[in-house]
Amino acid sequence: MEAVEKFLKDNAITEVESTLPDMTGNARGKFYPTKKFLAEQGGRIPETLLVQTVTGDWAANHYDIVDASDRDMILVPDPETLRIVPWADEPTAQVINDCYDTQGGLHPLSSRTVLRQVLALFDKEGLRPVIAPEVEFYLIQKNIDPDNELKPATGRSGRRETARQSYSIDAVNEFNPVIDTLYSYCEAQGLDVDTLIHESGAAQMEINFLHGDPLKLADQVFVFKRTLRETALKHNIYATFMAKPMQHEPGSSMHIHQSLIDVKTGNNIFCAENGDYSETFYHYLGGLQKYTPSAISFYAPNVNSYRRFAPDISAPVNMKWGIDNRTTGLRAPKAEPEATRIENRFPGADSNPYLAIAANLACGYLGLKGKLRPTKPTYDAAAEEGDTVELARSLEEGLRLLEECPELREIMGSRFIDAYIGVKRAEFETFHKVISSWEREFLLLNV
């Protein structure tokens, strides 16, 4: 708390946003006057916040997961996550907390705890994972009525995009005022954002983060999502990380680039001495191939997420991998030996960054321990129109695959897996009650 207190005083902070990521990856927490925050030394908050659905409801197995007394957990601020809140009206700081139970242990239902557990496994092996996320998003017109379809935001010209604008400089310039504010906010918070590009969707962008520590990058993605939403609202539009927000536009992903460093030597062990891929690379990749189907609900955590997975070049539909092949779900980009890495293209932009990164690393770890081997690389298009989608096609199917995977349960924690499945099944059942316009249009008078 000494480091926290120094930061708050040095920046003349009058208010603190004390936050934690919930199951969906959204911020929960409390607002504090600075003196009150320091006096509480972190504070307490109900543990049930960790297992609330995206609709604000609870899972059917809720009281099998948390105590029926609705007890508190203890929050411990991580000083490395202290940041200024640049959009606040008064000097405000934000901090991300680790969650502890009353016995003093990290709370097993916290997203941050799950990622810490997975990283500890690599640490025991003398390995340090390095990741770099790429997050896609859409800028859209304000949408007050959820029955109305979403529309891309209009830029400076006042016209909506009508053609694919991948990597277009002019298309990005349409939103220069928004982008300028975004970069200003990111700089004020010390977010390690790298390049920004226009993606193929109308008003769809991608922001890349510099590579680094998985927990720190998960924190940055968590903060970035809040930052972008606030930026968009400042310019009277919305920003969305929905996986498939519009029917005729491609989905949004969160690609995860990853490599492994030998702690003793500092070398990237995905690369052999002769410059080829190492055995470790192939074992790790084999783990991603084998266990990704079981982990898919962490990459596609919402009912909308599965609309991304269609036979199209925009999203993967099978477990093929390739060298510099963007049509595959697992890609090995062409790179210098020290930058040898694997890109996981399965996670959607709507995923909880802590859980997506944790699941990704867990799959790779299982490949290392089991010395698994991947298939041969694919050099052609990994899928074409009409091909069978090999992944789960719904959240419910993805959860059943997770439930049947004891290896991921052991790594990520049995209590957490039960909680995750319970929360996400509750969301699926809520969605399943809704009758869509498609059903009314084609089934009302035809069946």
Image (cartoon, helix red, strand yellow):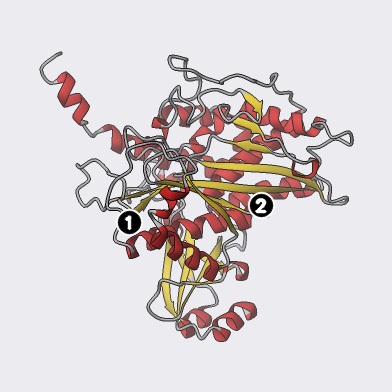
Disc 2 designates what residue?
211
State if disc 2 and disc 1 touch (CB < 8 Å). Answer: no
Mark 2 element type: loop
Q: Looking at the image, can residue 180 be seen?
A: yes
Residue marked by disc 1: 156
Asked if one can make out residue 71 in the rendered structure from this viewpoint, the answer is no
Relative to 284, say whether 416 is above or below.
Answer: below
Quadrant of the image containing the N terminus: bottom right
Quadrant assignment, res 280: top right
Quadrant into which the C terminus falls: top left
In this rendering, the answer to whether 253 lies above or below 157 is above
| Image height of 323 relative to 271, above or below | above
Depth check, front residue: 428 or 89:
89
Instruction: Give how far across and how far down residue 154 sits, in percent.
Output: 30, 51
Classify residue 365 as left or right of residue 91.
right
Q: Position of residue 331 (x, y in %)?
A: 64, 32
Q: With respect to residue 246, does 352 lie above or below?
A: below
Amino acid type assigned to the residue bearing label 2 in the image: His
Q: Is residue 87 left or right of residue 327?
A: left
Who's the residue at 15% across and 26% down the image? 440
- Residue 91: horizontal and vertical position, in percent? 45, 81
